[in-house]
Amino acid sequence: GSGVRSYHERVVDHYNNPRNVGSFDKNDPSVGTGLVGAPACGDVMKLQVKVDEQTGKVVDACFKTFGCGSAIASSSVASEWIKGRSVEEVMSIKNSDIAKHLSLPPVKLHCSMLAEDAIKAAVKDYEAKKAKRNESIELTE
Ligand code: FES
Ligand code: FES
């Protein structure tokens, strides 16, 4: 190494080639949308999950992040990690795991926090939509 403290290559990789950039139709019943912002810097992250109601597994994920390189890299990693996992597993992903994976410096920890918050918000949105649907099914029965 040159001795210069620079971003970890994984950050650069995920920043240059972010995985799963895009969006799903937020009105799709299988989709949960999490939209979160970091008050400290004003960066915004939108992360969406597509859940198979039968298996309770996240079958697809995508994101759009208007933010710094670490926030983009964090959301890219998050989108990779949540695919194929159950909703419960996804809820236990910690920002510290993402930060560790990307070797984020302390000042960039809030960027990975954004990813954890976005995952949780997306799953909660999915569950709220599901609960609402079940409620209206009960009412019409
Ligand atoms: Fe992509 Fe680890 S480098 S998830
Ligand atoms: Fe705020 Fe990265 S500097 S999300």
Image (cartoon, rainbow, N blue to C red):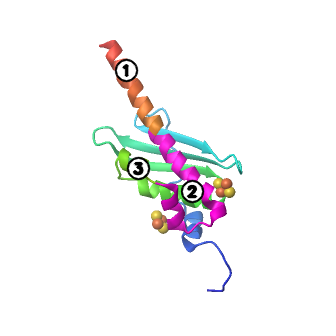
The kind of residue on which mark 1 rests is: Glu
The magenta segment: 94-123
Residue 98 rendering spot, x and y as whole percentages: 51, 60
Give above or below for 29 relative to 59.
above
State which quadrant residue 1 falls in.
Answer: bottom right
Identify the disc placed on residue 32: none
Identify the disc placed on residue 90: 3
Query: Is disc 1 placed on a helix, strand or loop?
Result: helix
Q: Specify the principal SS of the magenta part.
A: helix
The kind of residue on which mark 2 rests is: Ser
Residue 128 rendering spot, x and y as whole percentages: 44, 31
- The answer to which of 16 and 93 lies nearer the viewer is 93
Q: Residue at x 43, y 57 (%)?
A: 81
The kind of residue on which mark 3 rests is: Val
Q: CA distance from mark 2 to mark 1?
A: 35 Å
Residue most toward the bottom?
2
Q: Residue at x 48, y 32 (%)?
A: 27
**Which residue is label 2 attached to?**
112
Q: Residue at x 49, y 49 (%)?
A: 62
Give above or below for 2 relative to 102.
below
> Of marks 3 and 1, which one's residue comes earlier in the chain?
3
Specify few, some or many for label 1: CA neighbours under 10 Å numbering under 14, 14-19, or 20 or more: few
Specify few, some or many for label 3: CA neighbours under 10 Å numbering under 14, 14-19, or 20 or more: many
Query: Is disc 3 placed on a helix, strand or loop?
Result: helix
Q: CA distance from mark 3 to mark 1?
A: 25 Å
- The answer to which of 110 and 136 lies nearer the viewer is 110
Give above or below for 9 relative to 138.
below
Is 102 a magenta residue? Answer: yes
